[in-house]
Image: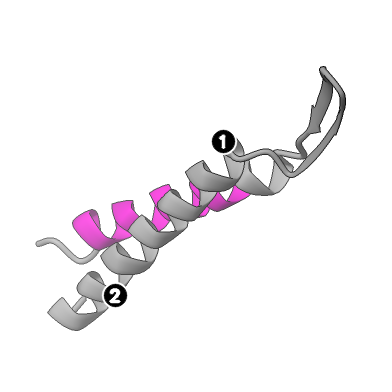
Amino acid sequence: MNKQVKTVLLVVGLGLLGYGIYTLVAPEASVSIGEFSVEAQDNTNAYITIALGIAAVALGFLGGKK
């Protein structure tokens, strides 16, 4: 694997990791009435994004070593 492909994989992987962690932490919907507040999250897509980011970073580091 050449150097440009490894660099692209690392950049994309880190971007996916950052976006996945952000969507995991940030609330998706929030409703507040007076002192009562409710937040809802759907984290299934965040886990998939984080897994794809880890896979891309791993391929960037380990792919094509001889």
39 sits to left or right of 34: left
Q: Identify which residue is drawn at 76% across, 36% down.
A: 41
Residue that carries the numbered disc 2 in the rendered image: 8
Q: Count residues near mark 1 (Cα–Cα under 10 Å), then give few for <14, some for 14-19, many for 20+.
A: few
Q: What residue type is labelled 1?
A: Val
Residue that carries the numbered disc 1 in the rendered image: 25
Q: Which amino acid does label 2 sit on?
A: Val
Quarter of the rendering containing residue 60: bottom left
Q: Identify which residue is drawn at 59% across, 46% down.
A: 23
In this picture, which residue range is highlighted in magenta? 48-62
63 sits to left or right of 13: left
For the C terminus, the quadrant is: bottom left
Residue 2 position (above or below residue 24): below
| Residue 59 x %, y % | 31, 59
| Residue 33 x %, y % | 90, 28
Q: Colour mode?
A: one colour
Residue closer to the observer: 34 or 7:
34
Q: Count residues near mark 2 (Cα–Cα under 10 Å), then give few for <14, some for 14-19, many for 20+.
A: some
Where disc 2 sits, the SS reads helix
Where disc 1 sits, the SS reads helix
| Residue 10 x %, y % | 27, 63
Residue closer to the observer: 2 or 24:
24
Q: Identify which residue is drawn at 56% across, 35% down.
A: 25
User: Mark 2 and mark 1 in contact (Cβ < 8 Å)?
Assistant: no
